[in-house]
Structure formats: C-alpha cells, structure tokens
Image (tube, grey):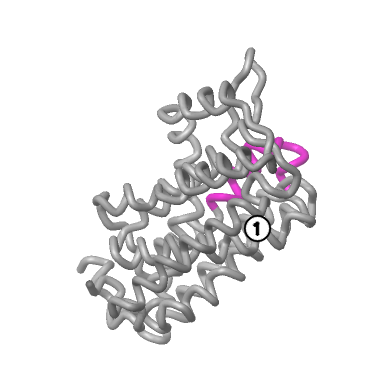
C-alpha cells in the first residue's frame, strides 16, 4: 500500500514519534561532537541528516508516513521567497540601509547550477524529517495553524545547539531567525499541503541556504563577497528576510485557510 494513503494509528503514531526524536537527538549529538575532530562541513552534513534518519526510523518502526511525492509546478512556487527577499534587499540598499555590490550579486546568481546541487542534498536531510514525515503526521491530528505552532519551535530547538556552540548564526540574531522560521513554516506548509510532496521544501531550503543565508555571496577576484551588507539586516539571522518571510508566509496561510484547506487532514495523502 502507498505510504501517502495511510493514517497512522495512535500506537503506531507514538512509536513513530519516539523513533523519530530518539534517532534525531542521537545523530545530531554525534554531529555536534564531530565539529572539532572532523571539521564543520562534515559535522554539518551529519546534523542536517539527523531528521532524515529519524524519519526513516519512524517509517519502519512506527510504521510512519513519509510524503515523498513527485515534482510538480508547486516546486516553482516554493522558490518565491528567494526573489522576494532579493527585492527586499534591493529596496533596502536603495534606501541606504544596506551596502550593495552588483558584481557580487552577478557572481552569486551564476552559481545556481553548482551550489544548489550540494545545498539541496543537505536540505533533503532536514526536509525529509520536517516536511516529509513530521508535518504530515501533525496535519492528520491538528489544523494547519496548530501544526505550524508545534513544528516551528521544534525546528528552532534543533538549531539551538549550533548557535550555543558558536558555529551557526548568533544569539543576537535569534529573534529575527525565529520570526523567519515562523514565516518559513507557514509558507512551505501551504506548499507542502498542496503538493503532497517533500521536494518543494527541499528546493526552497537549498536555495535559501545558497542565497539568503549567505546574503547572495558571489566571488570577486576569487574572494567570496556578500552582495548585500548591513548589520542585523541581512542573512537568515537578519530582519529583512525575517519580516518578508513572515509577510509571505502569513499571506499564503491566510489564502490556504480561506479556501478551506486549513482543517485537519482526514488522511495524510488526502487532497
């Protein structure tokens, strides 16, 4: 039977969640322990694949449901936050809030076919857990907004150890990052509900890490250079991306609920 047509029974749901979080916590702890001996890159891949390994454990131990899905036109919709944030950066630079380098931006946009491959691989590790497994499970139990309210702090907590260790983001940027995650979860939750697929979230996450996280960094004379610079405003810990993500996610969530799609799903694969 296809995974997407199943609704986990209460006992299976509990086993799935237990397996998911147990594996997630153990693998993330291993990744954090590897930062010094193995280097940040290897450790980051281990950490980012912790949700995926948790989802696979839940799938077979629960058994749980994973929304694999197929690529569709929703995968293009999922990329919308990238040009929205870019436009916000551009306007901010016109207002004098940010420093802007056209050469760095051109270099950033030229790396699309190359950088997205590696960032999407890493993003798959997270999104198979968040949008592939946990989101469908929550949506068969709760409304859209309640599922968002549950998943967002879990996703935020997952990032906190890296912030605490000083290898990811910053404590000063945490409020903006939290706001961005709320908007992100709302927006990609709508797209995931509509597409019944994990792939739009994977592509957006990969593109977000390629561009927004780096402030559209490109090479100038071989040196990585952010296209936009502004203290507390750029990057995924900056307020420009946070406010725009929240506005976009809130708008999509309003439309989703207004059109009758915000109620609890009867089945994980129901349209």
**Residue for point 52% across, 42% down:** 86
Q: Quadrant of the C terminus?
A: bottom left
Residue 223 at what x, y percent from top left? 67, 19
Q: Which residue is mark 1?
A: 177
Taking the view exactly as shown, the residue that stands out farthest to the front is 95
The residue under the point 40% across, 66% down is 252
Q: Which residues are magenta?
A: 33-49
- Comparing 63 with 187, the one in front is 187
Q: Is residue 221 above or below residue 270?
A: above
The percent position of residue 88, horizontal first and vertical second, equals: 55, 47
Give the quadrant of residue 92: top right
Q: Is residue 57 visible?
A: no
- Residue at the farthest left position: 1
Q: Residue at x 68, y 48 (%)?
A: 233
> What kind of secondary structure does the magenta stretch mostly adopt?
helix
Is 35 included in the stretch rendered in magenta? Answer: yes
Q: Nearer the viewer, residue 169 or 77?
A: 77
Q: Position of residue 217 (x, y in %)?
A: 60, 31
Q: Residue at x 26, y 71 (%)?
A: 269
Determine whether the residue tagged by mark 1 lies in a helix, strand or loop: helix
């Amino acid at each position: 039977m296809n995974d997407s047509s199943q609704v986990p029974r209460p006992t299976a749901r509990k086993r799935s969640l237990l397996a998911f979080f147990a594996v997630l916590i153990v693998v993330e702890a291993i990744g954090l322990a590897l930062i010094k001996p193995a280097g940040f890159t290897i450790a980051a891949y281990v950490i980012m694949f912790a949700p995926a390994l948790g989802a696979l454990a839940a799938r077979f131990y629960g058994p749980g449901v994973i929304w694999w899905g197929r690529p569709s036109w929703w995968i293009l919709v999922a990329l919308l936050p990238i040009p929205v944030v870019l436009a916000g950066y551009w306007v901010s630079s016109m207002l004098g809030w940010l420093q802007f380098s056209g050469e760095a931006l051109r270099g950033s946009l030229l790396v699309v076919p190359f950088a997205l491959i590696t960032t999407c691989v890493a993003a798959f590790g997270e999104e198979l857990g968040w949008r592939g497994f946990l989101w469908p499970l929550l949506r068969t139990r709760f409304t859209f907004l309640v599922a968002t309210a549950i998943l967002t702090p879990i996703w935020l907590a997952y990032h906190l150890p890296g912030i605490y260790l000083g290898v990811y983001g910053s404590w000063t940027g945490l409020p903006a990052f939290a706001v961005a995650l709320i908007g992100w979860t709302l927006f990609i939750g709508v797209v995931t509900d509509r597409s019944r697929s994990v792939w739009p979230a994977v592509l957006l996450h990969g593109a977000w890490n390629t561009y927004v996280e780096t402030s559209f960094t490109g090479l100038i004379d071989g040196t990585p250079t952010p296209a936009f610079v502004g203290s507390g405003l750029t990057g995924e810990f900056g307020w420009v991306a946070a406010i725009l993500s929240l506005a976009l996610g809130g708008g999509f969530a309003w439309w989703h609920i207004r059109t009758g799609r915000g109620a609890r799903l009867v089945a994980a694969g129901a349209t």
